[in-house]
Image: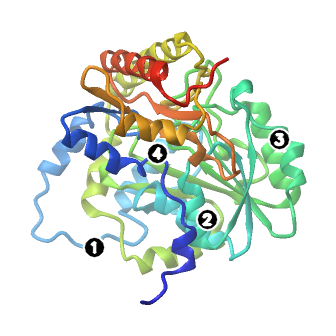
Amino acid sequence: MPLVSQRGSIMPDSPIRKLAPLAEKAKSKGVKVYHLNIGQPDLPTPQVAMDAIRAIDRKILEYSPSEGLLSFRTKLAEYYHRFNIDVDVHDIIITTGGSEAVTFAFMSCLDPGDEIIIPEPAYANYEAFAVVAGAVIKSIPAKIEEGFSLPPIEEFEKLITPKTKGMMICNPNNPTGYLYTQEEMNSIRDLVKKYDLYLFSDEVYREFCYTGAPYISAFHLEGIEDNVILVDSVSKRYSECGLRIGALVTKNKAVRSNVMKFCQARLSPPLIGQIAAEASLDTDGEYMLKNYNEYVIRRKFLIDGLNRIDGVYSPIPMGAFYTVARLPVDDSDKFCAWMLSEFEYEGSTLFLAPASGFYTGSGNGKNEVRIAYVLKKDDLAVCLKILEEALKVYPGRKIK
């Protein structure tokens, strides 16, 4: 039998989806499973997007340009201007989801063996995309006791070697919900400038910032304009995960040239997805404000509820719609699997994402889980009760 690839063998399992078979088995037994493991909003997709899909009147669903529809990119540039992100249509390349944007960025900027520094916990698929590109992640763990704030920049500098080519941040952060401060962003800028690194900046959750401080884009940082590769997606802000439409934005012409080669090789991003995403840019402010206010309510309810459960701690996330909570358990991977395979409360159980998968360092996050507050408040109340009851009887509960 032929051997499988080494690349495939070292590809990490998704902490978000790897327990899905257990969830499906539980459902087959009649257990109701509440999904807190995945960032799939339950809020409605904008009506203008649905109307645009229904109004499609084409005889052929043709290829779009490899860089995406010009009309969409033009409106997207106008959207970025509302956030004081100074880019034009030529700086924007449409991708098949934000995942492809990260993959193409890594493939276009990094050679096999090159290193990227990433604060953790971090979106788990960054590691997967690095494996695809042959790159190596060097991580620095943030601490839950400090609200997952950026570790001292001196710790990042210690990791820099001749192979270091870039840093990657997610702001607001998935999985922690942390929102980087101006001081932290300035320290990142100074390091990027000092060593002439790429700054890969995932800014998918920019609409969901819950502090009075302004949203800070990597493009707001002066002096590193050609170093910044911004990653974006319509999935979260418009509840359009299934459209698979993202964007890679950069002012670096050499990077854009490289990215376009990969874009041409995969032919084109989804046509129907672009049509719906372009229409979504006409969504009124009331839609965004309603969703924002809903997440504010859910965030407060969830965090207050978690911190009332004996032995549980969650810092207050300042952005996105996730939190990482510390549980009184021996192993969150085992606990999350146990919840799906062996536990139910009044016919229901929870699907949580073990946080160990959001770290590359062995042993980190072993008693932490990521929770996505993408369910309505009434459902979150049930989830909190299920979690509380589960922790009372879990065999691996850690006693204070």
Disc 1 to disc 2, C-alpha distance: 28 Å
- Return the mark for residue 130: 2
Q: Amino acid at mark 3?
A: Ser
Q: Amino acid at mark 1?
A: Tyr
Q: CA distance from mark 3 to mark 4?
A: 29 Å
Q: Nearer the viewer, residue 238 or 333?
A: 333
Find residue 337 and report its horizontal and vertical position in percent.
Answer: 43, 41
At 22% across and 72% down in the image, what residue appears? 62
> Secondary structure beneath disc 1?
loop
- Among numbered discs 1 and 2, the one appearing first in the sequence: 1
Tag 4 residue: 78
**Mark 1 surroundings within 10 Å by alpha-carbon count, few (fewer than 14), some (14 through 19), many (20 or more):** few
State how far apart marks 1 and 3 are (Cα).
43 Å
CA distance for labels 4 and 2: 31 Å
- Residue at 47 percent across and 63 percent down: it is 100
Q: Is residue 181 visible?
A: yes
Characterize the local packing of mark 2: few (<14), some (14-19) or many (20 or more) Cα atoms within 10 angstroms: many
Disc with the residue nearer the chain's start (1 vs 4): 1
